[in-house]
Image (cartoon, rainbow, N blue to C red):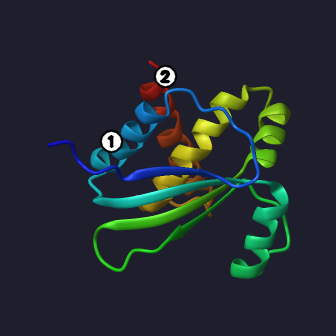
Amino acid sequence: MPSKPKVYFFYQNVQISLSNRSGLKKFIESVFRHERKSLASINYIFVSDKALLEINKQFLNHDFYTDIITFDLSEAEDIIAEIYISIDRVRDNAKALGISFKSEIHRVIFHGALHLCGFGDKTKGEKAEMREKEDFYLLKYFK
């Protein structure tokens, strides 16, 4: 009997083309298994800069653009979460970094999952560890 899906993608007034969505969803589930975390469900919601700015102001009292906001809604050990990703910001960041949108969107998707697995990005050390993990999963996914 196939297991119930745990990863969902939603698009709020944005157009984005993610190839092999079912494979990507399975891979995200494998990230949680690899990090020894139990995933119940995760919703990725792809939005505009404007929409994410409103969420940032309303829920975090931050008045600035960001590429991702992760909400851990878990009440127990099994992770339940919503991750909002600004397609505009990811596109701009990819251009500024001189990398493909495809690479940057996957990095941000994995970044959100890693936050839920307990990885932070506030200190220099945390940022270095987060980048190392992102790179690890990007290489593994695109191999």
Residue 80: % across, % down = 40, 67
| The N terminus, quarter of image | top left
Residue 62: % across, % down = 79, 75
User: Do we see residue 132 in this rendering?
Assistant: yes
What number is the disc on residue 7? none
SS at circle 2: helix
Residue shown at 39% from the left, 74% from the top: 74
SS at circle 1: helix
Q: In the image shown, does 136 or 73 lie closer to the viewer?
A: 73
Instruction: Name which residue type carries label 1.
Output: Ser
Specify which label sits upstream in the sequence, 1 or 2: 1
Q: Which residue is mark 1?
A: 30
Residue shown at 39% from the left, 37% from the top: 27
Tell me: 125 left or right of 8: right
Q: Which residue is mark 2?
A: 142
Residue 13: % across, % down = 76, 52
Residue shown at 30% from the left, 77% from the top: 76
User: Do we see residue 119 in this rendering?
Assistant: no
